[in-house]
Amino acid sequence: MSKICMGCGIALQDSDEQALGYTPNLENNYCKRCFRLKNYGEKRIEERILDEDILKKVNSNTGMAFFFVDFLNINRYSLALYQKINIPKVLVISKSDILRKEMKYEKIKLWLKKVYHINDPILFISNKKKSYSENIFKVLDNYGYHKAYIMGITNAGKSTFLNSILAKHGIKKEILASNKPNTTLDFIKLKIDSYTLYDTPGFSYLNDQNIINKELKMTSFIVKPKTTFVIQDYKFYFPKENKVTFYGNIPINRIYKENKQDHLLNIPANYDIVLPGIGFINIKMSTEVYVSASNIEVRCDISEVEYE
Ligand SMILES: Nc1nc2c(ncn2[C@@H]2O[C@H](COP(=O)(O)OP(=O)(O)OP(=O)(O)O)[C@@H](O)[C@H]2O)c(=O)[nH]1
Ligand SMILES: [Mg+2]
């Protein structure tokens, strides 16, 4: 088997400078692309393994899947990918340090179960706080597996997580992690004690303009009639007054004039409008909202789910 790049997982080669995996010297551990990304933060747009091919590869194997998604990328699109995994699986909410204190893990678990029908175990992991990284071994032991695929949405912190496990186990290898989407390009096999863990390429996400690695900010607004909120490329027009709270870390602009050209949504009280990768807007009172994008997801707010 040919040697693979420790950065991205692609087989190293010294024949085609334009192709992935190129290195001038096969003794190197990183290909030229990963060397440049690691040292200069440079990354070009490149071909990547298709989402279906990642799923096919995992589904045709044995072992467990740990699917990483950060809180802002929880939406029906990412969880539909999760549901396509056919081997025993665990949902991992990564970067849990971005959650606000009032967002309790138990409540989030209940919400994921009720709103997204997640019936598998759910773990919370923060590479910043180094919390719970050993929990995956406990889960593997409980299920009797020694092989795990660390999968999930791009930029969710999979490679960083594996690097912290490698370091903890005294293994001097480092996979490349970066704040750019699609850093890992192929499967990377890691032997840790009696376990085999695979780092895998991330699934592409809906919005790659923002990468939020800080605690979520919460901003509340009293909405006057005929207000449009502008959040990046999205516009939300409220014909009537309301109260809304935005969870996220990017600026919001307001415009006060009529604007009914867009898609009409009827939103129940205490529902959230989901802005994938950006945040969500909690709507206090049931209302009509005109939205600039079609196919916007609306879901019940975490505070609304009740313990039975
Ligand atoms: N706030 C926060 N940031 C994190 C955490 N873990 C990783 N990051 C940051 O998130 C970015 C992505 O990390 P990676 O480990 O490369 O993510 P990945 O899931 O391997 O991404 P792909 O290889 O593209 O699929 C980096 O800038 C990390 O520093 C975490 O627990 N909390
Ligand atoms: Mg990675």
Image: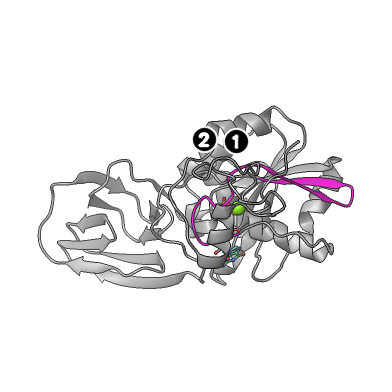
Is 200 a magenta residue? no
Is any part of residue 225 visible from this angle? yes
Residue at x 38% of width, y 45% of height: 297
Tag 2's secondary structure? Answer: loop
Q: Which part of the image, by quadrant, shows the N terminus?
A: top right
Residue at x 48% of width, y 45% of height: 204
Residue 236, x across and y down, in percent: 24, 56
CB at disc 2 and ligand 1 closer than 8 Å: no
Q: Nearer the viewer, residue 72 or 117?
A: 72
Tell me where residue 278 sits by quadrant.
Answer: bottom left
User: Which label sits on residue 54?
Assistant: 1
Residue 20, x across and y down, in percent: 55, 43
Is 189 a magenta residue? yes
Range of residues picked out in magenta? 177-199
- Which amino acid lies under the numbered mark 1 shown in the image of this protein? Ile
User: Which label sits on residue 50?
Assistant: 2
Residue 42, x across and y down, in percent: 47, 61
The residue furthest left is: 258
Is any part of residue 307 visible from this angle? no
- Note whether 101 is above or below 94 in the view shown: below
**Classed neighbour count for the residue bearing mark 2: other residues with Cα under 10 Å, few (<14), some (14–19), many (≥20):** few
- Note whether 100 is above or below 258 in the view shown: below
